[in-house]
Image (spheres, helix red, strand yellow):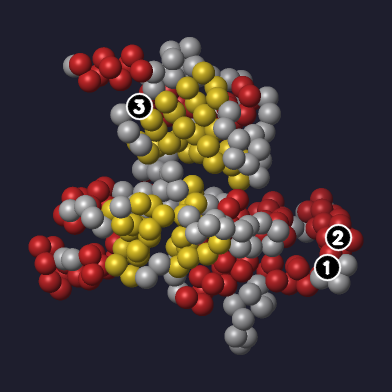
Amino acid sequence: MTSDPATGSLFGKLRSRFSSNEESGKDQLQAEIDQLHAGNVLTDTEYSMIEGSMAFHDKVAREVMVPRTDAFMIDIEDDLEENLDDILRQPYSRIPVYRQDKDQIVGVIHIRTILREARQHGFDQLTYDRLISPPLFAPETIELDNLLVQMQTSQQQLAILTDEYGGVTGLASIEDLLEEIVGDIDDEVDKAEVLVRQLNDRQFVIYGKMPLTDFNERFGTDLEMEDVDTLAGYMITKLGVIPGRGEQLEVPLDNGMVLTTKRMRGSRLLTVLLTLPEENYEEETEE
């Protein structure tokens, strides 16, 4: 057994195939993989995983992270009981904790720690000190394979990503990394809760894979488009372009709502920001 978690991995083996002459080796390996897929030697799933493994080495954490603006975090200065209520309403198992400002991350709370401590001491005896564990920090420019090794060696599954000045830019979980190889990992939480997340009274973050029929039912719209089933497909078709990384493009709807591209992964639109019109919000508050 090797001491290096990356040695013997699929992307490690693939990388070794073209380490001496990277570009020509990549082209040759890609041609071989395409040929095997065309000849039905590789299934679609196997082909997709190999493609993901090859691309994995070339990507950095910034490309797969959840931006800090979308990340759920809690302030250690806030009342613990209120924070626990918020945590238990969320579908996440690991929650970053900051002090006054999201650039000042002081630790991470694991839902399992909450349950263990509550079981032993009772919820009324919980304190931040009992719940918080040290965070794993990594630069947003770290390559994904190196970040995966850090997660394995530190036994942490959530990384706090920072820019060159030390400011927090986002989060990357081990699930985010693995999805680059195997595709979307849909657990019961993903299916039931995470397709829509409310930011405030007028804004929602929505997963691009949300079916248009579900979106219409949830928000009272009637979006439809031939051969398009998801919100991401609708937006990309409407825009007529693939947004670049960090580019935010808007699709206004007839009812005053605005859809804005948020998080991209390659050519895939992962999340969309929905903004309700101001007049709708004012009517709701008056009621």
View extreme (top): residue: 254
Q: Which mark is residue 18?
A: 1
* Disc 3, SS: loop
**Circle nearer the N terminus (2, 3):** 2
Residue 182 falls in which quadrant of the image?
A: bottom right
Residue 205 falls in which quadrant of the image?
A: top left
Q: Quadrant of the N terminus?
A: bottom right
- Mark whose residue sits in front, 1 or 3: 3
| Numbered marks: total | 3
Q: Is residue 4 left or right of residue 230?
A: right
* Disc 2, SS: helix
Residue at 21% across, 52% down: 78
Look at label 3 and name its amino acid: Arg
Residue 4 falls in which quadrant of the image?
A: bottom right
How far across and how far down the image is residue 255, in percent? 43, 13
Other residues around mark 2 within 10 Å, as few (<14) / some (14–19) / many (≥20): few
Q: Which mark is residue 202?
A: 3
Task: For marks 2 and 1, give the CA distance.
Answer: 7 Å
Look at label 1 and name its amino acid: Phe
Compared with 104, 273 (above or below) is above
Which residue is tagged 2? 23
Residue at 22% across, 20% down: 285
How far across and how far down the image is residue 54, in percent? 72, 60
Compared with 124, 82 (above or below) is above
Look at label 2 and name its amino acid: Glu
